[in-house]
Amino acid sequence: MSNVPDTTTKVRFTDGNTRLDAAGIQWIINPWDELALTRALELKDAGAISAVEVINVGPALTEATLRKALAIGADKAWRIDAETADGYQVAQLLAQWLKDQAFDILLAGVESSDYNSSGVGIMLAALAGIPSVSNVSGLSIEGGQVILKREIEGGQQQLKAHGPFLAVVQKGIALEPRIPSMRGIMTARTKPLEVVPAHPVAARTAYQAFSLPQPKGSCRMVDPEQPDELFRLLHEEARVI
Amino acid sequence: MNFNFTEEQLMIQQAARDFAQRELIKDVIERDEKAEYPTQHVKTMAELGFLGMLVDPRWDGGGMDTVSYVLAMEEISKVDASCSVIMSVNNSLVCYGLEAFGNDVQREKYLKPLARGEKIGAFLLSEPEAGSDATRQHTLAEDKGDYYLVNGTKNWITNGNTAGTYLVIAQTHPEKGHKGINCLIVDRNSEGISVGPHENKMGMRSSDTHSVMFTDVKVPKENRIGEDGFGFKFAMKTLEGGRIGIAAQALGIASGALERAVQYAKERKAFGTVIANHQAIAFKLADMAVKVENARNLCLKAAWLKDQHLPYGVASSYAKYYAAEIAMEVTTQAVQIHGGYGYVKEYHVERLMREAKLTQIYEGTSEIQQIVISRDLLKD
Amino acid sequence: MSNILYLAEHREGSFRKPALELASYAHALARQTGGQAIALVLGKVGADQLSRLGSYGTQHILHAAEGSFDPMDNGIWSTAVAEAAIKVSARLVVFSASLQGRAIAPAVAVRLEAGLVAGVNGLPSSMQPLTVERKVYSGKALATVVVHTEKAVMTLSPNTFGLKESSGDAVAEVWTVPTLPSLSFEVLETSRSEGKLLLSEADVVVSAGRGMKGHEHWKPVEDLATVLGAATACSRPVSDEGWRPHGEHVGQTGKIIAPNLYFALGISGAVQHIAGVSSSKVIVAVNKDPEAPIFGAADYGILGDVHTVVPALVEAAKRFKENS
């Protein structure tokens, strides 16, 4: 589970544009991870799985977001105490922690809304030596069998998976993220949140600098009575047809 | 002085906001137009725990503080005052009254289902002849030994038809005046109860409001709350608690209108720029924002006092009075800022304006609040 | 002298635009490093298709013609790519940022102990160390990334580099991957849900929203797409209402696309929708509301009712096609 800035945040950079200006940022559960958690809890409610745990790699400030995951219904939260510079570091720390854990299914959101690399889930599977399936838009358990729906170019496939495995999940895995109930919120602090130290791991890449994109120019209006003019412009000026 | 909210309070606020902005918003305009009860939404509110927020977990409630309740009420009222009035009546009138003044048997039997939202509660005080003046009840609850015989009519009852449990304020000893009034817990399914047609209201049309008629309804003695003659005091004390809920509702209606007006002003162009850049509009918005902030602070202070077990009746009166008055002002200005678009249903603000009006009237009119406030101010 | 290995994905026997774009990119990289652009093709593809890669600068092709690569399995594909990279001493391995490319690039990076940079939008500004730009914060910002490892794996964002022809020998070598893992799952069913033209590959996309007021009004939208040879798409409320299939939904929570030309018909332009299409080269908006946010994101706009404007556009498109 990744801790990311609220998706309506206007991003700003500081320190000579070398890092995100975190002042005033509201932190949330990465939207795709939230959908993954929602699906896991639906399966738990249906009695198909026994427990759901969430794991985050991050500094102490991520605990508030982890408690939100507990409020939504996770049974336990883990925080691997580290500030990371890239996805590889996150994946390696997770892989080390995973060695001592027993699990059947690992779910990872397709990407985090801050770095969008789509890397951590697959890297974790590769480092831990477990099979992975990507682009998973549906997960169900029927008669003890795990059935995955995944998107492929121009279609979909239904797969039968054998655990333990990691699924990289995307839109469709759950319809809407679950809203925590009042009871869930009030009991979040009673659920275990375990902090584990991180072994030193070097990052493989680094963010050198950030910038904001150039704002777009204004829109060129075309008379609705002159539709041919639009195609002329698209051909001669924009050169896209 | 700490103006910060706790992590739990913020989560509660966010959950209420997500529920309102994702679920309630979908059909709020349609339900208002058709005066359709939000059956599915009430179920979801029960599941999420919004209907018994303040009740102790011992009675299957959420055990949350009043500040959290105010935050949740505000968020829901920004979108749907019908759902928030259902929530307010259930939480801060019926559940509160039962929890504070009922005995264990009554709480076990009636409070638990209400706190879980399995049953909805209604508070029956107003009558055709008696609204603000509750010192004399025309509904009679004759003492018949081991039961009370109830006859009379109650008016303007929110959740009148959908409630499973009624708290009925009725006169047992007419000669004792307000000291001869009792509060009885009445099962909706009791023989002799009939419910009038759904009132065709100006606003909050998705919540059901009915008159309720009692014809020789038998209510067991053990359903009386408190000692004989406690009813008037019960009503007044319970209304103090309910006042905070309605104040928060009015706050939400106002802040919802403010949010929409700010958004519209930033998008709508006139005379060469967005209207937010014209001082006439910007100054209106500034005034609206100050009013909303004041209302919020009054609501939170009253909530805080209640949570500290300090006297909060007058503070809740300040909050309800002010929030209701500014809700009317702010929603009216919000419609004005929207111009022609403010007059059509699609833009929500006209509905908020219609909803604001009722907050000045029910659960203690603004004039009654002025009496409470001035009496407190002028006492020796 | 460092070689570039790229995975040339193919569909229904041919290489589509994203693969050819990747070939162009790999070639440009090879010119930067002084090495060769080498393609890896998993599964059997005809010789004429293989030689097409040569037109975009590919010198050498490893053709893993035998071997079971369908259905796509992360473990099998990433092993094949990693083995190929080792075989040709590739310093850089590049993929399209496609469903498949994004799925295996991280695993290949782990196997090669290489840094991963996903979704790059151009050539590196430096090779020592590898320094390249990509979008972050869901497209709200740009970042320059430096790779500390000797080798690197990158995925290329669609429609950012373009097709650049160059002559390459495209010598194809049939190659068998030494050891491949077995399939880690069982396929129960495969279904084709989209139209002939994939949204992710189309140069022109015609998209429409709630302003169309109902699925029964979609014919002019489909006609415009047909005349222009475009794929069709829609906004979220339209797919939520069931007017159009979910696969057509473009937006932050749907598909993110980057066509050359995107028509937004009767779409107001909510932030989440724009996030899905802002990488389009040109956006044309048609809406009757002058305040609609879509006009802030569009390059060209027509203020009018979609029910009259779109049919007029269909006729104008037909005339344009006839005359060009």
Image (tube, rainbow, N blue to C red):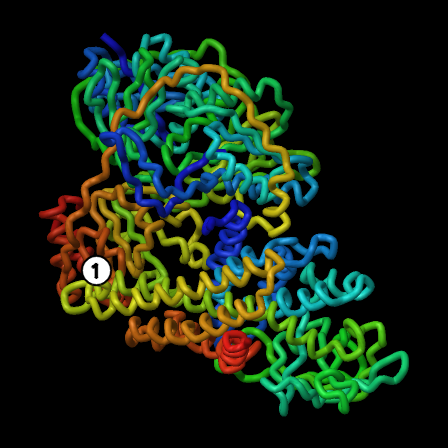
Residue at position x 47%, y 64% in the image: B298
User: Residue C76 placed where, x, y %?
Assistant: 48, 20
Does residue C234 appear to the left or right of A93 in the view shown? left
Assign a secondary structure to mark 1.
Answer: helix
Foreground residue among B125 and B314: B314
Residue at position x 19%, y 11% in the image: C34
Does the image show residue C208? yes
Foreground residue among A132 and B143: B143
Residue at position x 42%, y 27% in the image: A119
Residue, far left: A236
Residue receiving disc 1: C313
Residue at position x 34%, y 43% in the image: C199
- The chain under label 1 reads C
- The amino acid type of the residue labelled 1 equals Leu
User: Residue A105 placed where, x, y %?
Assistant: 60, 30
Does residue A130 appear to the left or right of B278 in the view shown? right
Tell me the crowding category of disc 1: few under 14, some 14 to 19, or many 20 or more residues within 10 angstroms, Cα based: many
Does the image show residue B203? no
In the rendered view, would you say C92 is above or below C305?
Answer: above
In the rendered view, would you say C63 is above or below B62?
Answer: above
Q: Quadrant of residue C161?
A: top left
Foreground residue among B188 and A138: B188
Foreground residue among A142 and A186: A186
